[in-house]
Every structure is written in structure tokens, then in C-alpha cells.
Image (cartoon, rainbow, N blue to C red):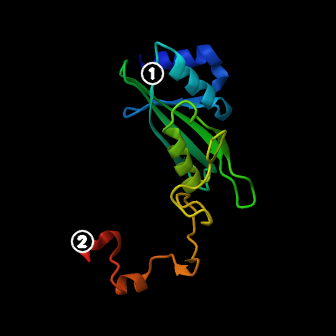
Amino acid sequence: MSFDEIKAFITNKFGEAVLVREQRQELMSYLVIQTDQIAAVCAELHAYEQLYFDVLSCQTGMDNGPAAGTLEVAYNLYSIPYNHQVCLKVVVNRNSADEPLPVVPTVSHIWRTADWHEREIFDLLGIQFSGHPDMRRILCAADWEGYPLRKDYEAQEYYHGIRVAFDEHNRNNGFKGEDWQNN
């Protein structure tokens, strides 16, 4: 099924208002879906026999930066039996430090792999997934401060008395960092 046919299926089922916008580009076009509708759209794309998107190939989050004021979640869906794919996105507003985290409905009840993808997005970007069965950090410690993939993230200087930030002290004491082959 083509991108236009998948788009038509979604708008016929959910109405034109479900689409925030579409982005056509050579590498991978995508549809931006109303955030509160993403789980319903994904469930329909999974359940409808002629589409049957049986694989959530990737689910990732992006920070568009403080100037843009938005975060995104992208869903790359693939159908093994039909060999078609589509990319969907949702866009949420960034929160400030004194505001609650943005919330997106979970799709982990449709594709189990979303369980860990959503935990990673929560951990690194600070987007919560409503209805997720185990919404807790997966890579950082439970009491870690902030969300390391946010563009305005400032690493805490110490974590339980251990210096966090990379500096010349680390390099001078044998740690060669990611550029170890050139050191």
C-alpha cells in the first residue's frame, strides 16, 4: 500500500482532523497525528487485515530544542506480509522545570517492543506514556536528575559523591573517552 493509500485509510477512519500535518520527503515521508489519537490510529493500522502493521520497527523521541518548544515521538511501522511501511509522529510541547512532563498514550498494548522504547524515551527525553505498564527509568538511575537527550540538559556535577562530568582530570588519569584511538 502506498503512503497516500495509508493516509486515506487513516483520514477515512478517523476524519481529516486526526492529521496535524504531513511531511513528504525523499527518504521517508511521515504523518503527524493528533497526540490523543495515536494509540487508536496505531491499533487500527495493526488490526485492519489489508494493512496489518505487525511490527513497530522503531519508536524514538526527539527534542526540537527550547526555541522550537516541542518534543516528538516517531513510530516506524512495518508490515511483514505486505512489505509496506509508514512513519507516524506526534508532537508535544516541552515542559519547563516546574511543569509536569508531556504525556503521550502508550502503544505497548499493541506492540510489546514499545514497552522498552517508551521507557527509554521517558528516561532520556522526559515524555511520559499514559497507560504504560511500567513507566520508570531504564538507562539512568531512578534518582538521576534531568533528561540527558534534551538539548538544554545540564549534567549534574556529582551523583552520590561521584563526579559525573568528563573533564581533564579523567583524561589525565587514564580515561581516554570516546576518542581513545586518537589519544
On-image quarter of the C terminus: bottom left
65 or 128: nearer the eye? 128
Q: Position of residue 109 (x, y in %)?
A: 58, 32
State the CA–CA distance, disc 1 to disc 2.
44 Å
Q: Position of residue 14 (x, y in %)?
A: 64, 19
Give the residue displayed 48% in from the left and 39% down from the top. Answer: 113
Label 2 packing within 10 angstroms: few (<14), some (14-19), many (20+) = few
Q: Amino acid at mark 1?
A: Phe
Please indicate whether residue 178 sits to the left or right of residue 56 in the image.
left
Q: Position of residue 46 (x, y in %)?
A: 51, 22
107 or 34: nearer the eye? 107
Which of disc 2 and disc 1 is earlier in sequence? 1
Q: Position of residue 99 (x, y in %)?
A: 75, 55
Residue 3's label in the rendered image is 1
Q: Tell me: residue 110, above or below residue 2.
A: below
Residue 150 appears in the picture as rendered: yes
Q: Amino acid at mark 2?
A: Gln
Residue pushed farthest left? Answer: 181
Q: Secondary structure at mark 1?
A: helix
On-image quarter of the N terminus: top left
Pointer 2 residue: 181
Which quadrant of the view contains residue 10? top right
Which quadrant of the view contains residue 148? bottom right
Residue 63 appears in the picture as rendered: no
8 or 145: nearer the eye? 145
Give the residue displayed 48% in from the left and 13% down from the top. Answer: 49
Which of label 1 and label 2 is nearer to you? 2
Please indicate whether residue 53 sits to the left or right of residue 33 in the image.
left
